[in-house]
Image (cartoon, rainbow, N blue to C red):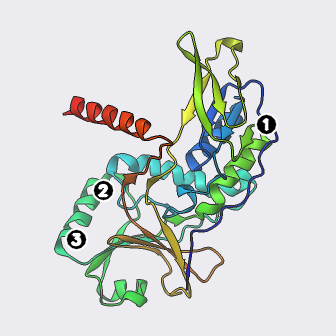
Amino acid sequence: MIFGPPTPVPVTSDAKLPDHVDVAIVGGGIAGACTAYYLARAGVSVLMCEKGEVGAEQSSRNWGWVRKLRRDPLEVPLAIESQRLWDGLEDELQAPTGFRRSGITFAARTSKEIEAHEQWMVATAAFGLDVRRVAGVELDALLPSASGQWKMALHCPSDGIAEPALVAPAFALAARRLRAHVLTNCAVRGLEMSAGRVSAIITERRAGALFNRRCGRRGMVAAFPEEWGTPQGAEYQPAPRRYLPALHPRSLGLRPRHAHGRVVIVRYADDLVMRFEKKAHAEEMLLALKAWLSALA
């Protein structure tokens, strides 16, 4: 049976906009919610505005992987530190995230895929990762449901997976406990400028001067695109329970859901989906993007 994308944990909206904040965050996905939490933890007054529900778009449909395996070598130190944070995140946020070190496997069927795996192993050797090559009987034992389909794989037992539908709401609720303001179903429509700086945001509810000037702090706006990377996900049931680690077979990602007999299947794509209310705005953005790319060339 096929299910649609998971429904994130609901986050009730604040009743009204605050009069003043130091930072306004546009977008309540995982990036926006994390930013709100860590800023609030540092004592910064924060407003996070989400046009729909917290974590209800790409942030609840992504792979849910927390991995070092097959990361760009430049990202590996950050991935190591990220996993250290994930180990204690549920206690810190006082909410479930579904994180567990289940292991992740990247399988290879063709010579080209095997060569890419080998090159990655060489490039990341200095980090001392617990990644190993598996093939033959060992690979069949690791992935019995896919026995004989793959020539080799890379397996990292310390990599893990989390539940995307839980994580962004957990950060948002934790941020609120630290006195951050969280508004849902409240799209940001524009900015007001004063002396070359952002002085206020314009929302569906009202416009107002939202940025403090105390302590010389500048008003700041952090904006996060609503859809990055993998655009769609679905659940399949019954799950092949023998797929214990998360698995990457070519253009799909498989992740067993926590406490469910299901596997989440996501299509891989590196794209950005941008939405505009008016065609003129889209055309203006396209011209600006073309000019930027020409400058890079």
User: Can you identify the residue that label 1 sits on?
Assistant: 179
Name the amino acid type tagged 2: Ala
Residue 231 occupies quadrant: bottom left
User: Can you identify the residue that label 2 sits on?
Assistant: 125
Q: Quadrant of the C terminus?
A: top left
Label 1: which secondary element: loop
Name the amino acid type tagged 3: Ile
Q: How far apart are marks 1 and 2 (CA)?
A: 44 Å
The image shows residue 6 at horizontal and vertical percentages of 61, 68
User: Can you identify the residue that label 3 sits on?
Assistant: 114
The image shows residue 1 at horizontal and vertical percentages of 55, 86
Q: Residues within 10 Å of mark 1 (few under 14, many from 20)?
A: some
Label 2: which secondary element: helix
Q: Which residue is drawn at 27% across and 30% down?
A: 291
Q: How far apart are marks 2 and 3 (CA)?
A: 17 Å
Q: Relative to 125, does residue 15 appear above or below in the rendering? A: above
